Image (cartoon, rainbow, N blue to C red):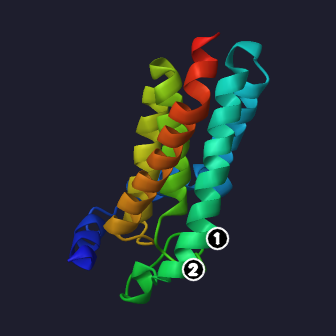
């Protein structure tokens, strides 16, 4: 069923969307857009605590996803089941579940939203585009995306409500 959904999404392919989603997914490579945003927040005294929390959320989500869950589940990527699909990006060599791009994007987007809705809404929109790009590019199943959303969101909620909410209300 998941491959059918990916095939349906793949039918949307056109040169514009191909370039667009390759560019969008590259923002999530190694969490670079979120690391840059976190550093920018760290450099501003008013937002320093938010930057620390966001980067910590990114780090923990990446650790749990890449070091614990992916090797434990060991799910192959969709393109290995459908070799007729041309992959537009470098084929990822790690396992598929959960999506690291999605997990890190939602970890940061949700954390920012909990702290500051004005910053969080655009971050969540970007996170959603990054997540969808992973399916469009045929490198993740929908449940990989869902797993990344749940992991990143859970880490952010735990950090925010156990450590950062009180610190941020003191500001």
Which quadrant is the N terminus positioned in?
A: bottom left
Query: In the rendered view, does 80 fall on the left or right side of 95?
Result: left
Q: For numbered disc 1, what is the local secondary structure? A: helix
Outermost right residue: 43
Kindly state the secondary structure of the residue where label 2 is placed.
helix
How many discs appear? 2
Q: Mark 1 Cα within 10 Å, few/some/many (few <14, many 20+)?
A: few
Nearest the eye: 31 or 138: 31
Seen from the viewer's position, the closer of residues 66 and 27 is 66
Residue at 68% over, 48% down: 32
- Most distant residue in the top direction: 171
In this picture, is 35 found above or below 170?
below
Is the Cβ of the residue at disc 2 closer than 8 Å to that at disc 1? yes
x and y percentages locating residue 18 in the rendered image: 43, 60
For residue 100, above or below residue 149: below
Task: Tell me the tag on residue 100.
Answer: none
Residue under the image location 69 percent in, 24 percent down: 49
Residue 67 in view, yes or no? yes
Residue in view at x 38 percent, y 55 percent = 132
Q: Residues within 10 Å of mark 2 (few under 14, many from 20)?
A: some
Q: Could you tell me residue 52's position as x and y percent?
A: 71, 33
Residue linked to disc 2: 71
How far is disc 2 from disc 1 in space, using C-alphas? 7 Å
Q: Which mark is residue 67?
A: 1
Q: Position of residue 21 (x, y in %)?
A: 46, 55
């Amino acid at each position: 069923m998941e491959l059918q959904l990916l095939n349906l999404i793949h039918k949307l392919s056109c040169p514009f969307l191909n370039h667009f989603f390759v560019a969008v997914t590259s923002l999530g490579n190694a969490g670079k857009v979120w690391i840059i945003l976190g550093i920018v927040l760290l450099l501003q005294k008013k937002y320093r605590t938010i930057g620390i929390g966001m980067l910590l959320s990114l780090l923990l989500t990446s650790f749990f996803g890449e070091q614990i869950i992916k090797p434990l589940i060991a799910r192959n990527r969709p393109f290995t089941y459908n070799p007729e699909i041309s992959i537009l990006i470098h084929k990822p060599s790690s396992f598929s579940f959960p999506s690291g791009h999605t997990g890190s994007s939602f970890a940061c987007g949700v954390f920012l939203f909990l702290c500051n809705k004005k910053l969080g809404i655009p971050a969540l929109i970007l996170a959603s585009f990054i997540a969808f790009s992973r399916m469009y590019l045929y490198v993740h199943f929908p449940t990989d995306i869902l797993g990344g959303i749940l992991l990143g969101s859970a880490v952010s909620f735990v950090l925010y409500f156990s450590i950062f909410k009180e610190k941020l209300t003191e500001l």
